[in-house]
Amino acid sequence: MAVSRADDSVLGRWWWTVDRGMLYALILLMVLGYVAMLTVAPMAAPRLRVEPSAFLTKQVAFLAAGAALMVVLSLFERKYVLLMAAVGCVGAFFATALALKFGPEINGAHRWLRVAGQQLQPSEFLKPCFAVTTALLLAEGNRRAAMAAGLSRFAALKPRLVWYGMAMGLLAAIGLVLKSQPDIGMLVVIVAVFFAQIFVAGIHWLIVAVLGGVGVLAGIGIYFTMPHFRDRLDRWWFGISTPGGGDNFQVNRAAESFGNGGLLGRGPGEGTVKARLPDAHTDFIFAVTGEEFGLLVCLLILAIFCFVVVRGMLKLLAEQDPVVVLAATGLLAQFGLQAFINMASALQMIPAKGMTLPFISYGGSSVLAIALGMGMLLALTRRRGPRREEAG
């Protein structure tokens, strides 16, 4: 794309201020997602009772829409991104709550709503919007505390307690809804993102330790009160296998896939284990990739995710706006953690969890929600100030 540095149009300013390296990496992930769907479509489509061509066309449409959404959002000014995230957080929260009452039950959970004949998972969109909204609340608490610092220690503490309390209240409300669905994996990601943000916000490490302890106790409570969660953890920890189904059945097939693939893989479309993996197109797409394309391509995918997260964090070292620092931290933590959970589940490093691999797994809600988060990230991290005149 040839755009002159003298071009002062919206597109010209965007091209020279957006992080093109990160943009290229995200688009490459989408391309790899398309390739992955090509290999898995013949097996996954019959399970969903659709034609392979319709299965592939639908995912390509979602990827194209996601790419367009990501680019369009990256054109926005920061103030509009923050406003959109706050409004989106409220809307996604109520939609997630509505799914409890009006959503269909799928695999024992109420996480989806039917919109225009399609299944929509509102909590996917809640994740990025919550990260940015939380950043606004935490940054405002710090700003007001700094303004009151000259009065007294209590005066500086009060606004922080108020605004941090609002953020924690929002987290508690979201946690209650997600637990009721139930969607413990989504809850774990949102809580982990919040912890990352309050740590970066400068909260005292003792408070972080206390909150961490509360999180551990909450996890223990969930283990003893939610049989589904306890069963899944026991299957992973004690190696209990259920013939013909269950978590261990799929993770064992995933391990078989990686073993069959070796270094270079068996070749596109040549994998056999995907025929016995019910979630080959979603939770275990990484295992299918390992069998057909081998260890090297799996390492390439891992490297791309690491590149996006590390590059984003490095950009924040020079950022002066605390809202941007906290929001980008949350978005990057969410993106990286979701990828880690998916890949680690396939490798049996953690209990199996229904978490998609960003831009690679099948699913419209996942693709569009991740594109929403990455579009906001690209907009927030765009370079500000006069453009440099030097070439390159």
Image (cartoon, grey):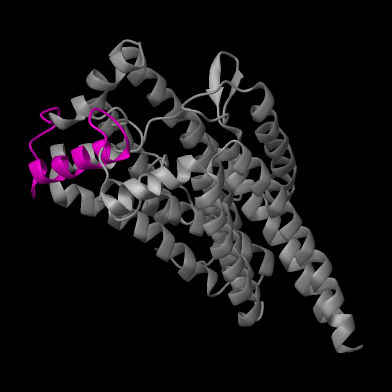
Question: Is 192 placed left or right of 49 in the picture?
Answer: right
Reply above or below: 71 against 53.
below
> Which quarter of the picture shows residue 176?
top right
Residue at far front of view: 224
| Residue drawn at (49%, 47%) of the image | 185
Reply above or below: 240 against 69.
below
Q: Residue 32 location, x and y as percent?
A: 29, 39
Question: Is 133 placed left or right of 273 in the picture?
Answer: right
Which residue is at the front of the view, 324 or 189?
189
Q: Residue 228 location, x and y as percent?
A: 46, 40
Which residue is at the front of the view, 331 or 81?
331
Question: Is 340 placed left or right of 388 in the picture?
Answer: left
Q: Residue 117 location, x and y as percent?
A: 56, 13
Is residue 248 covered in magenta?
A: yes
| Residue drawn at (42%, 42%) of the image | 355
| Residue drawn at (65%, 54%) of the image | 132
Is residue 187 covered in magenta?
A: no
Is residue 382 shown to the viewer in this render?
Answer: no
Which residue is at the front of the view, 335 or 35?
335
Reply above or below: 226 against 319.
above
Q: Residue 116 location, x and y as percent?
A: 60, 15
Reply above or below: 317 against 300.
below
Is residue 162 shown to the viewer in this render?
Answer: yes
Magenta range: 242-271
| Residue drawn at (89%, 81%) of the image | 155
